C-alpha cells in the first residue's frame, strides 16, 4: 500500500511540474506575441517632425503623425496600410502631413481636424513639390521636408538620402 501511495505522490508532483512548465511556456509565447504586436519604429527629421510606423500582426500597419505610444490603434488621423507597403510623408508644417501612398492604403481622419492629406487629392498643386517626376521616380524640391518609408524593410530615408533611425 505504501508503494502505491508513493507512486501516486510522484505522479502528482510530475503533473504539477508539467503544469508549471507548460504555464511558463504559454506565458512566454503570449509575451512574445504581445511584444511583436506592439513593436514600432519612430522616424524623425526633428523633434516636431516625426512619424510612427506600427507594424502589427495580420499584415496591418498604422502610420501615425508624431510619436504614438498607445497600446490600441489610434482612433483618427492615421494611415492604415500593409506591412509590405511604402509611403512618402511630406511635412507641410508642424502638424500637417501630405502622404503619397500605395493604392490599397487608407487614411483615417477626424472630421475638422485633418492632420493628414492624400497627395493624389490635389495632384495638380502637389506635383509642384517635385523638380523631377516620371511617374515612378521623383526628386522633391530642396525646401521640401520629407521621409520616404519602406515598411517591409523597416527603414526610412530623409531628403539627403540618409537612413533614419
Image (cartoon, rainbow, N blue to C red):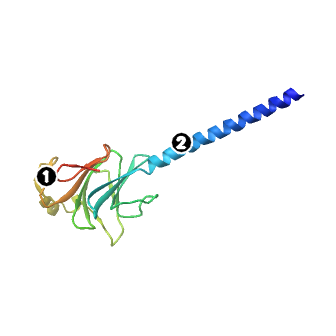
Image coords of residue 76 (percent x, y): 38, 64
Which is nearer the eye, 72 or 27?
Answer: 27
Q: Using the numbered discs, state the Cα–Cα distance from disc 2 to disc 1 in whole angstroms.
A: 45 Å
Q: Secondary structure at mark 1?
A: strand
Can you name the residue that lies furthest to the left here? 131
**Picture mark count:** 2
Q: On the image, numbered disc 1 is attached to which residue? A: 139
Which is nearer the eye, 112 or 153?
Answer: 153
Image coords of residue 42 (percent x, y): 33, 55
Can you name the residue that lies furthest to the right here? 1
Residue 19, by quadrant, is top right
Q: Secondary structure at mark 2?
A: helix
> Mark 2 or 1 closer to N-term?
2
Q: At 33% across and 71% down in the image, what residue appears?
A: 113
Image coords of residue 89 (percent x, y): 25, 57
Which is nearer the eye, 105 or 2?
Answer: 2
Circle 1 residues within 10 Å: few <14, some 14–19, many ≥20? few
Q: At 71% across and 38% down in the image, what residue appears?
A: 16
Which is nearer the eye, 14 or 136?
Answer: 14
Q: Is residue 6 left or right of residue 18?
A: right
Q: Quadrant of the N terminus?
A: top right
Q: On the image, numbered disc 2 is attached to which residue? A: 29
Amino acid at each position: 500500500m505504501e508503494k502505491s501511495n508513493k507512486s501516486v505522490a510522484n505522479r502528482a508532483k510530475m503533473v504539477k511540474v508539467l503544469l508549471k512548465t507548460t504555464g511558463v511556456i504559454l506565458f512566454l509565447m503570449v509575451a512574445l506575441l504581445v511584444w511583436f504586436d506592439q513593436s514600432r519604429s519612430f522616424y524623425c527629421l526633428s523633434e516636431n517632425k516625426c512619424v510612427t510606423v506600427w507594424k502589427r500582426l495580420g499584415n496591418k500597419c498604422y502610420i501615425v503623425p508624431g510619436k504614438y505610444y498607445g497600446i490600441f490603434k489610434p482612433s483618427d488621423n492615421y494611415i492604415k496600410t500593409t506591412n509590405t507597403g511604402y509611403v512618402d510623408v511630406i511635412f507641410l508644417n508642424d502638424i500637417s502631413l501630405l502622404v503619397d501612398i500605395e493604392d490599397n492604403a487608407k487614411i483615417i481622419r477626424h472630421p475638422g481636424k485633418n492632420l493628414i492629406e492624400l497627395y493624389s487629392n490635389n495632384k495638380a498643386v502637389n506635383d509642384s513639390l517635385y523638380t523631377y517626376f516620371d511617374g515612378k521616380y521623383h526628386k522633391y524640391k530642396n525646401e521640401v521636408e520629407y521621409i520616404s518609408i519602406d515598411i517591409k524593410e523597416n527603414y526610412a530615408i530623409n531628403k539627403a538620402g540618409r537612413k533614419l533611425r
